[in-house]
Amino acid sequence: MPTAEQPVALITGASRGIGAATARELARQGYALVLAARSARALEEVAAELTAAGASVLPVPTDMLSQPELQRLADVALGRYGRVDALVLNAGIGGTGVVARMPARAAADTIGTNLLAPIELTRLLLPQMLDRRSGAIVLIGSVAGRVSAPTSVVYSASKFGLRGFAEGLRREVAHRGVDVTLISPGFIRTALTADIRLPMPGPELVARAVARALTHPRREVFVPRYYRLAAWFAEALPALTDAILRRTRRR
């Protein structure tokens, strides 16, 4: 059990990439951790690594598309630690390809994992934060939640939705002791970007942004920071953005 001073963080999608990097970063900062992911073996490996380093870690294999498993995750976390101080909603899946050719369940699975699961986990864990008037929620969005590109239409839709949820939630809980931050990464070196041949930073950069957001919350944090310019460009010059993306796709 954590001490009264030790914060507890629940991280989804914690078996690899940004989630695993965030788990390592928060473990270094003294958090007790509840780690959730669909891949049980990879999740156990991350948990074993952090436990060996002295962290208090509870791995909970979870299918983000299953409401009963999300309920179980919340129940197990609260049963073990008594509270969740920081909720890091990172689990997500990538693009579904061209809309006319995507598989029948692709859109439902993408929206379910990237948007509905974060909403449901927030519903389950927000009340105990509000009761204590203390807590932080960090949602891992994407620059694709600002700039929707061909072949990533449904993924972008899920991240646009997540941005709307984060914005409304922040206003809903304002002045009630719970902070809400949206982290919007651009291209980051993870399994989702394995096929993209561009120089890009590793997930540790996002993990550090998450850690900062837990103590210094902001509305939205772009990682790396220069992606803020891409978001501004798409909003200020939509016709030019359309032309650039059409040309990029043809190439």
Image: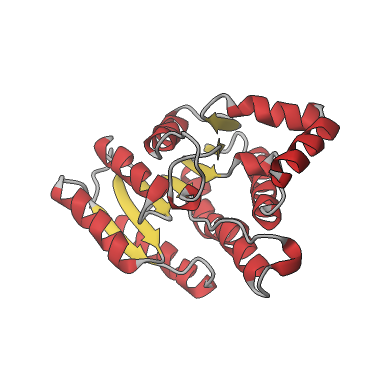
Residue at the front extreme of this rendering: 251
- Relative to 146, does residue 228 appear above or below in the rendering? above
The x, y position of residue 12, in whole percent, is: 43, 55
Can I make out residue 84 in this image? no
Q: 88 or 96: which is nearer to us?
A: 96
Picture coordinates of residue 189, whole percent (x, y): 43, 42
Q: Residue at x 53, y 53 (%)?
A: 127
147 displayed left or right of 45:
right
Q: Is residue 98 visible?
A: yes
Residue 186 appears in which quarter of the rendering?
top right
**Residue located at (49% from left, 50% from top):** 195
* Vertical order, 130 against 98 (above or below): above
The residue nearer to you, when weighing 199 against 63, is 199
Question: Residue 131: x, y in percent?
Answer: 50, 48
Residue most toward the right? 239
Closer to the camera, 91 or 106?
106
Residue at 51%, 30% in the rendered image:
217
Locate the C terminus by quadrant: top right
Q: Quadrant of residue 247?
A: top right
| 120 relative position to 104: left or right | left
Image quadrant where residue 204 sits = top left
Q: How is the image coloured?
A: secondary structure
Number of dots carrying numbers? 0
Q: Position of residue 199 (x, y in %)?
A: 46, 33
